[in-house]
Image: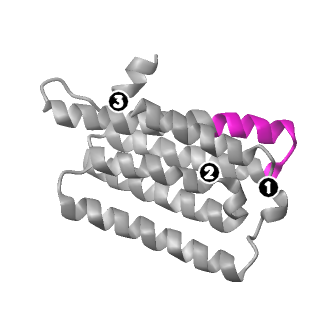
Amino acid sequence: MLKKLSKIGVVEGERPLLTKRKTLLNHISLLFMFLVSIKLVGEIIVNDWLGVTIAFLILVLFFIALVFNFYQKSVLAKVYITALIILNITALNLLFGSGFGAEFGFFPLIMMIIMLYDTTKVKIAWYAIAAICYLTVKIYLNNHVPLMVDRLSDSAFYFMFVGSVVAVSLM
């Protein structure tokens, strides 16, 4: 089933590089959906309905990338997934602070940008956007307390670390 899901949007006879990129995008989306599903179940078990809402929203957002690939919008899918991951890392840091471990997501993000984009200018543009978001978060957190720091679970940091290691190993 995983093999079939990873081939969403792949068309026979297309360039091998495009097929690899679509498959990588599908793997990234499926990985995030799997990890967020685990988190979603955990939030349901502890009866944290705000956490359930956030996890479900993130799950739907990553599912949209699969829909883009399904409808042969691979350029839109790679831009969408890159922007979504940057926004996810930024939002999680703003909400929970650095104790959440969202910074671990930057290494797989950098690897993903290297693999998905051809031109150096586009890669540098994405790196710049990620750096600006990171610096903005750091400046904000130096002057303010994260909005939901009191709702941060002890396991979140390790969950993000393991998720990032798994993401890197699958690339």
Please name which of the two marks, 1 or 3, marks the residue nearer to the observer: 1
Q: Tag 3: Cα neighbours inside 10 Å, few (<14), some, or many (≥20)?
A: many
Compared with 4, 107 (above or below) is: below
Count of numbered badges drawn on the protein: 3
- Amino acid type at circle 2 is Leu
Magenta stretch mostly in which secondary structure? helix
Q: Secondary structure at mark 2?
A: helix
Q: Position of residue 150 (x, y in %)?
A: 84, 62
Instruction: Name the residue tied to disc 2.
Output: 57
Q: Position of residue 65 (x, y in %)?
A: 41, 45
Magenta segment range?
Answer: 36-49
Q: How far apart, in angstroms, are the residues tagged by discs 1 and 2?
A: 18 Å
Quadrant in the rendering for residue 32 = top right
The stretch drawn in magenta includes residue 47: yes
Q: Residue at x 21, y 28 (%)?
A: 11
Q: Residue at x 45, y 37 (%)?
A: 168
- Looking at the image, is mark 1 or mark 3 earlier in the sequence? 3
- Tell me if 25 is positioned left or right of 140 in this view: left
Q: Position of residue 156 (x, y in %)?
A: 72, 47
Question: Which of the two residues, 94 or 131, is positioned nearer the viewer here?
Answer: 131
What label sits on residue 152 in the rendered view? 1
Compared with 18, 77 (above or below) is: below
Quadrant in the rendering for residue 80 = bottom left
- Tell me if 123 is positioned left or right of 134 in this view: left
Quadrant in the rendering for residue 115 = top left
- Amino acid type at circle 1 is Leu
Q: Position of residue 73 (x, y in %)?
A: 28, 46
- Amino acid type at circle 3 is Ile
Please name which of the two marks, 1 or 2, marks the residue nearer to the observer: 1
Instruction: Name the residue tied to disc 3.
Output: 8
